[in-house]
Amino acid sequence: MAASLFFFSQNPFKSPQISHPKISLSSPKPTLTLFTPPPFISNNATRRLSCKALSTISLNPSNYEFSDASSEMELRLQLGGGGTLSSRDIFVDAEDSSLKIGVKQSGSFITLVEINKLYEKIKSSETIWYIDEDQLVVNLKKQDPDLKWPDIVESWESLTAGATQLLKGTSIYIVGDSTEINDKVARELAVGLGYTPLNTKELLETFAKQSIDSWVTADGSESVAEAESAVLENLSSHVRAVIATLGGLHGAARRADKWRHLYAGFTVWLSQSEAIDEESAKEEARRHIQEGSLGYSNADVVVKLHGWDADHAKTVAQASLSALKQLIMSDKKLPGKKSLYIRLGCRGDWPDIKPPGWDPSTGAEVPTGTL
């Protein structure tokens, strides 16, 4: 059986449109940005993962030094091998999101570094390099000088290390078709980020002193969804948490009218799919978002899964962080907007945040001076 991962990031935010002197944040319908999918190949005997969407790197950590100093970064590579090298023996190919470095040995070029996904984008045309004794020094300029790079490559380690400056404590909610998948990926994210792992299934079952299945049998899915919605209300003020929600038909996240408190954090939709290639997965995700037929389509980030293996939960978690990074890089004010949304009471007005005094039941604003 073949399986694949397709990564998407919704990028709904443009510059805020001000329609009220105090607070007004509005945005158009989400658009879709596609991450190149990595094939995830499995059969009855073995499972193998080939990740093209996540960064692949040919670089020995003991042979390079990386430093980030404001808008410029420096990569130092140990050339070794003895002998004298000239500029004609070095090959440096820098693109906005990738880097390849080779050295000429015995008449042919040998690849020293091949990174298909840098931590973020660089100004490739401004890359310079030179030889310093037995080291190759490559100077790189960031497209965003304010972003601190934990490492040259986007990896699980650099994504989790860099998440603090991007997320600013904002919680993450994992929603989707499977309670099990939501939980496995949420726990990986929580460990990597140093966040608190929470699970609405466990909280509900502890409260009700019965399993979700028996609860559904006794009282129906709507009763469970209502209860989970109440749990999410209590969790909405939490920071630095990764919350795994109920999947499938029973959870609050599947219902578009239950998202009032989910908007308090960044939401990742783990969407199981029958798509077998990139284009069909992209079309499927776009269709779900446009139709809005599932509450899940409200999520900030979509990760498409064709097949599942719990051993690769960290890979899905890494894809989720990568997509969230791209989303926040498109609008760095997003964590602050989430914080504002919480402070105003999670009234359900995301992303068009209304002024203080707005009544979600009537849509009316309290006149100035009456508060």
Image (cartoon, rainbow, N blue to C red):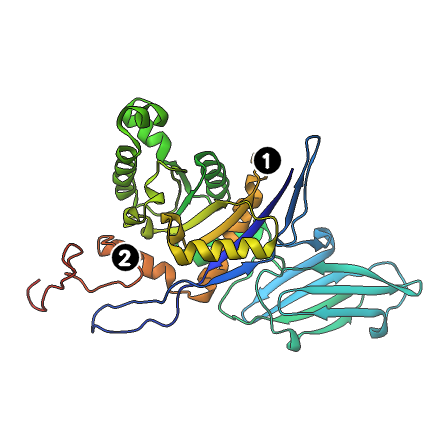
Question: Amino acid under label 2?
Answer: Tyr
What label sits on residue 297 in the rendered view? none
Residue 216 sits above or below residue 347 on the image: above
Residue 126 visible in rendering: yes
How far apart marks 2 and 1 lie (CA) works out to 36 Å
Horizontal and vertical percent for residue 182? 45, 39
Q: If you read the primary sequence from the N terminus, does the residue marked by circle 2 or circle 1 appear first?
A: 1
Report the front residue among 196 and 256. Answer: 256
Report the front residue among 335 and 39. Answer: 39
Question: Amino acid under label 1?
Answer: Asp
Horizontal and vertical percent for residue 320? 50, 50
**Element at label 2:** helix
Report the front residue among 293 and 331. Answer: 293
**Element at label 1:** helix
Q: Residue at x 29, y 67 (%)?
A: 25
Using residue 133 as the reference point, say whether residue 139 is left or right of it.
left
Position of the C terminus by quadrant: bottom left
Q: Which residue is mark 2?
A: 341
The reply to whether callout 2 and callout 1 are in contact (CB within 8 Å) is: no
Q: Which residue is mark 1?
A: 311
Query: For residue 238, what is the image quadrant?
Result: top left
Residue located farthest toward the left when viewing the structure as drawn: 370
Horizontal and vertical percent for residue 197? 41, 38
Tell me the crowding category of disc 2: few under 14, some 14 to 19, or many 20 or more residues within 10 angstroms, Cα based: many
Residue 134 visible in rendering: no
Tell me the crowding category of disc 1: few under 14, some 14 to 19, or many 20 or more residues within 10 angstroms, Cα based: few
Using residue 225 as the reference point, say whether residue 10 is left or right of it.
right
Using residue 368 as the reference point, say whether residue 137 is left or right of it.
right
Query: For residue 64, what is the image quadrant?
Result: bottom right
Residue 201 sits above or below residue 256 on the image: above
Query: For residue 20, what is the image quadrant?
Result: bottom left
Q: Residue at x 32, y 49 (%)?
A: 256
